[in-house]
Image: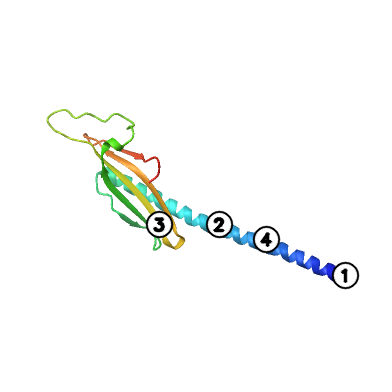
Amino acid sequence: MIALILILLNLTTAILLDSIEEGLLNLRLSQTDIHLARAWRAQDSALAYAYAQFEQGVPIYENLNFTSDLSARAQQSPVDCELLPELPVTPTKVTGSATATAQCWLLKIEVQQLSQRLRLQKSYWLYRGPSNERFWLPKEGGP
């Protein structure tokens, strides 16, 4: 009889510990998901900011701080326009004596949350044509 009670007690303890461990694992995943969602939201905010700056023709500032732990960096570097994929529309041709040329950049947006060892990075092509038309294309194939 005592052996049966000990077996039932041991089985009950094992079931309780298993459910507690599963609950802790779910809580841990939920916290990770929250931090990842915040980083994605920060990345979207940095992208919206950089896009607005590019559309207005003003410089894109490099560092953006969202909280004490979450920061974004936008790095814009000039590239040869031949590297860009096919543009969505044909650029306008400039007539006359003005020799305007297209300008292209690669924009890397990196979001970091150091306390969670979290880093997201996305890259975009920026194009400004001779008539000041602007295109913004995601870079395929990673950063």
Q: Residue at x 84, y 67 (%)?
A: 4
Label 4 or label 3, whichever comes before in sequence order: 4
Q: Residue at x 36, y 47 (%)?
A: 47
Numbered disc in front, either 1 or 2: 1
Q: Name the image quarter holding residue 57.
A: top left
User: Which image quarter holds the N terminus?
Assistant: bottom right
Q: Residue at x 19, y 30 (%)?
A: 94
Numbered disc in front, either 4 or 1: 1
Reply above or below: 73 against 138.
below
Q: Residues within 10 Å of mark 4 (few under 14, many from 20)?
A: few
Q: Position of residue 46 (x, y in %)?
A: 36, 50
Residue tagged by mark 3?
A: 112
Residue tagged by mark 2?
A: 29
Q: CA distance from mark 4 to mark 3?
A: 34 Å
Q: CA distance from mark 1 to mark 2?
A: 42 Å
Reply above or below: 50 against 117.
above
Q: Position of residue 12 (x, y in %)?
A: 75, 64
Please state if 133 lies on the left or on the right of 119 as rendered: left
Q: Amino acid at mark 1?
A: Met
Label 2 or label 3, whichever comes before in sequence order: 2
